[in-house]
């Protein structure tokens, strides 16, 4: 089985794939102050509670946008399962045109594009990843990485709004009923969610104009299920899309 780790700025996603499906997926808070021993104990307890032994895992792969934790989880994988994890970067064999992959491209975005190309191999595909940052990335039918647009994420925007104003609260993001909010919570939800829906639809249109082609649009990330009903141009929604990219890359290596 495959042990996959997706280390993001806010959340670390840990998952086990049996070759056909994701058997287990769990999330923990990203904490750069934790040592490899502390993460090891956390993961050992989790895997034991799920009845997963060290010999059940024969491959491990890591995508990380937090450099301080990349090698930490490499050590954790080796201590837990006795195997060396594949750490994804711009040079990793991934099924895309390597000459078009920018060296500084985040490994999470690379995984998104790999999964998008696997899902729509004959089409241009654009991935909307609603994480700590919103990333809008596009891949061509021949596997070329065309580029990425990055904006603050939904939660990042809410936190910035509440943290820099005297009377606006921190809120839970839920689908708004109207754009005409009648209190602070309704107004923030309307502004953030409808605003981001308009933002991504504008970026999709601009992308299609620049490449003179229609794109398939995929939504993923922690809040993709919340905002997806408000976005007209979606062909596929999958919160495990980045993990699927990790699985494809693992199989290729």
Image (cartoon, rainbow, N blue to C red):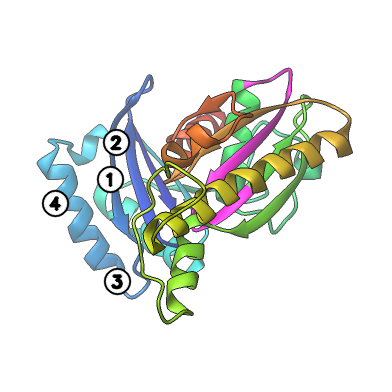
* Residue 131 is a magenta residue: yes
Residue displayed at 51% across by 49% down: 193
Q: Residue 45 shows which numbered tag?
A: 4
Pointer 3 residue: 34
Q: Tag 3 or tag 4, which sits nearer the N-term?
A: 3
Q: Quadrant of the N terminus?
A: top left
Asked if the residue at tag 3 contacts the one at tag 4, i.e. Cβ–Cβ closer than 8 Å, the answer is no
Label 1 – label 2 distance at C-alpha: 6 Å
Q: Nearer the viewer, residue 18 or 155?
A: 155
Pointer 2 residue: 57
Q: Is residue 68 placed above or below 194 in the rendered structure?
A: below
Q: Quadrant of the C terminus?
A: top right
| x and y, in percent, of residue 70 in the image | 45, 61
Asked if the residue at tag 2 contacts the one at tag 1, i.e. Cβ–Cβ closer than 8 Å, the answer is yes
Quadrant housing residue 75: bottom left
Q: Tag 1 or tag 3, which sits nearer the N-term?
A: 3
- Residue stretch rendered in magenta on the structure: 120-135
Q: Tag 2 or tag 4, which sits nearer the N-term?
A: 4
Q: Nearer the viewer, residue 253 or 150?
A: 150
**211 relative to 186 in the view: left or right:** right
| x and y, in percent, of residue 158 in the image | 46, 64
Q: Tag 2 or tag 1, which sits nearer the N-term?
A: 2
**Mark 3 crowdedness (10 Å alpha carbons): few <14, some 14-19, many ≥20:** few
Residue displayed at 76% across by 36% down: 97
Label 4 – label 2 distance at C-alpha: 15 Å
Pointer 1 residue: 81
**Mark 1 crowdedness (10 Å alpha carbons): few <14, some 14-19, many ≥20:** some
Q: Nearer the viewer, mark 3 or mark 2?
A: 3
Quadrant housing residue 56: top left
| Secondary element type, mark 2 | loop
């Amino acid at each position: 089985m495959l042990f996959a780790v997706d280390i993001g700025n806010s959340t670390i996603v840990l998952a086990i794939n049996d070759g056909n499906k994701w058997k287990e997926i769990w999330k923990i808070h990203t904490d750069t102050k934790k040592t490899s021993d502390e993460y090891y104990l956390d993961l050992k307890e989790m895997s034991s509670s799920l009845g997963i032994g060290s010999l059940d895992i024969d491959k491990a792969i890591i995508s990380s946008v937090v450099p301080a934790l990349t090698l930490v989880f490499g050590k954790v994988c080796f201590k837990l399962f006795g195997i060396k994890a594949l750490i994804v970067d711009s040079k990793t064999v991934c099924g895309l045109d390597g000459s078009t992959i920018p060296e500084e491209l985040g490994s999470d975005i690379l995984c998104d594009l790999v999964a998008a190309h696997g899902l729509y191999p004959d089409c241009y595909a654009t991935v909307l990843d609603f994480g700590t940052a919103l990333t809008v990335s596009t891949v061509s039918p021949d596997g070329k990485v065309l580029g990425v647009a990055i904006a603050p994420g939904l939660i990042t925007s809410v936190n910035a709004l509440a943290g820099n104003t005297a009377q606006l609260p921190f809120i839970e993001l839920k689908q708004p009923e109207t754009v005409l909010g009648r209190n602070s919570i309704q107004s923030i939800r309307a502004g953030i969610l409808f605003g981001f829906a308009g933002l991504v639809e504008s970026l999709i249109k601009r992308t299609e104009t620049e490449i003179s082609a229609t794109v398939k649009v995929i939504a993923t990330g922690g809040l993709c299920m919340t905002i997806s009903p408000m976005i007209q141009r979606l062909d596929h929604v999958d919160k495990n899309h980045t993990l699927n990219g990790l699985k494809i890359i693992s199989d290729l290596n």
